[in-house]
Amino acid sequence: MTCIGFLSVAPVVEGSMSEHVADAVAALEEFDVEYETTPMGTIIEAEESRALFDAAHAAHEAVDHDRVETFLKIDDKRTVDQRAADKVDAVEEHLGRPARSDGE
């Protein structure tokens, strides 16, 4: 997969947004993408940018609220086949250890 994205979709509300974020994440299931949700957003991987944009749009639309903020950052490597995990592996190779504070 060559198109990697970072997606954050959330309503502008007081209190917990987790229910709305869950709606956005669930919308990704309808698309040919792989994803992993983290505390700060969701990493999405797709073969083509169109699939990633379509999935991000669906996630945005899935949040049923009067105001929704969406952040999408894309790394579209067009001449290299690289997955998100490969990018982390490269950093860990330079570190000589896992790229987290607990060392796991």
Image (cartoon, grey):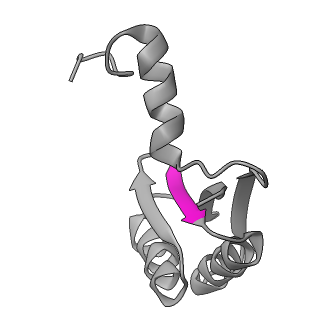
Residue at 53%, 55% in the rendered image: 43
Rendered location of residue 79, percent (x, y): 77, 51
- Which quadrant is home to the C terminus? top left
Quadrant of the image occupied by residue 63: bottom right
On screen, 91 above or below 38? above
Name the outermost residue toward the bottom.
30
Magenta: main secondary structure equals strand
Front residue of 29 and 41: 29
Rendered location of residue 20, percent (x, y): 48, 74
Rendered location of residue 41, percent (x, y): 52, 52
Give the side of residue 31 with respect to residue 60, left or right.
left
| Res 13 visible | no
Give the side of residue 30 with respect to residue 99, left or right.
right
Front residue of 70 and 45: 45
Residue at 63%, 78% in the rendered image: 55
Asked if the magenta segment contains residue 54, the reply would be no
Give the side of residue 77 with respect to residue 41, left or right.
right
| Res 52 visible | yes
Residue at 62%, 52% in the rendered image: 81
Asked if the magenta segment contains residue 43, the reply would be yes
Q: What are the residue bounds of the magenta stretch?
A: 40-45
Rendered location of residue 102, percent (x, y): 23, 17
On screen, 4 above or below 23? above
